[in-house]
Amino acid sequence: MDWARQIHVKSPAEIALMRAAGRVNAEVLATVKALLKPGVSTADLNAAAEAVLRKHKSISPFKGYGHPPFPASITVSINRELVHGIPKKDR
């Protein structure tokens, strides 16, 4: 396999976009982490994440993905859940 053909060197503009997206993601994660405590619903965590995303005019890659479309901006798995848990008010 010709690995050189598989690697796309990013331009400075692409790197700047990736850096900006990484900063938004870091803010979302910090915001959600600050809210984590017993009694806070996963829907509340999702709402906080969506507020940060809206502030930055950003969208989550999860929201609307697939068929049926994923209904939330974050995936939340609690305890024995494996992955891609849907945020809910009652958990």
Image: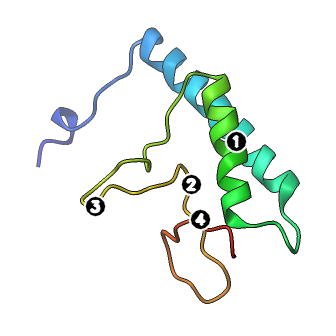
Residue at the extreme front of the image, as rendered: 89
What is the distance, in whole Å, between disc 1 and disc 4 at their CAs? 15 Å
Amino acid type of the residue that numbered disc 3 sits on in the rendered structure: Pro
Amino acid type of the residue that numbered disc 1 sits on in the rendered structure: Val
Q: Are marks 2 and 3 in contact (CB under 8 Å)?
A: no
The label number, if any, that marks residue 87 in the structure image: 4
Q: Which residue is label 2 attached to?
A: 74
At x 61% / y 33%, what residue is drawn?
A: 53
| Left or right relative to 4: residue 36 | right
Under circle 3, the secondary element is loop
**Would you place residue 81 above or below residue 53 in this image?**
below
How busy is the neighbourhood of tag 3: few (under 14 within 10 Å), some, or many (20 plus)? few
Q: Are marks 2 and 4 in contact (CB under 8 Å)?
A: yes
Q: Are marks 4 and 3 in contact (CB under 8 Å)?
A: no
Closer to the N terminus: mark 2 or mark 3?
Answer: 3
How busy is the neighbourhood of tag 2: few (under 14 within 10 Å), some, or many (20 plus)? many
Residue at the extreme left of the image, as rendered: 1
The label number, if any, that marks residue 68 in the structure image: 3
What is the distance, in whole Å, between disc 4 and disc 3 at their CAs? 16 Å
Q: Position of residue 51 (x, y in %)?
A: 69, 36
What is the distance, in whole Å, between disc 3 and disc 1 at their CAs? 25 Å
Q: Position of residue 89 (x, y in %)?
A: 67, 67
Closer to the N terminus: mark 1 or mark 4?
Answer: 1
At x 38% / y 21%, what residue is drawn?
A: 10
Amino acid type of the residue that numbered disc 4 sits on in the rendered structure: Pro
**Would you place residue 64 above or below residue 44 in this image?**
above
Q: Which residue is label 1 attached to?
A: 28
What is the distance, in whole Å, between disc 2 and disc 4 at their CAs? 7 Å
The label number, if any, that marks residue 42 in the structure image: none
Q: Position of residue 76 (x, y in %)?
A: 60, 67
Q: Are marks 1 and 2 in contact (CB under 8 Å)?
A: yes
How busy is the neighbourhood of tag 1: few (under 14 within 10 Å), some, or many (20 plus)? many
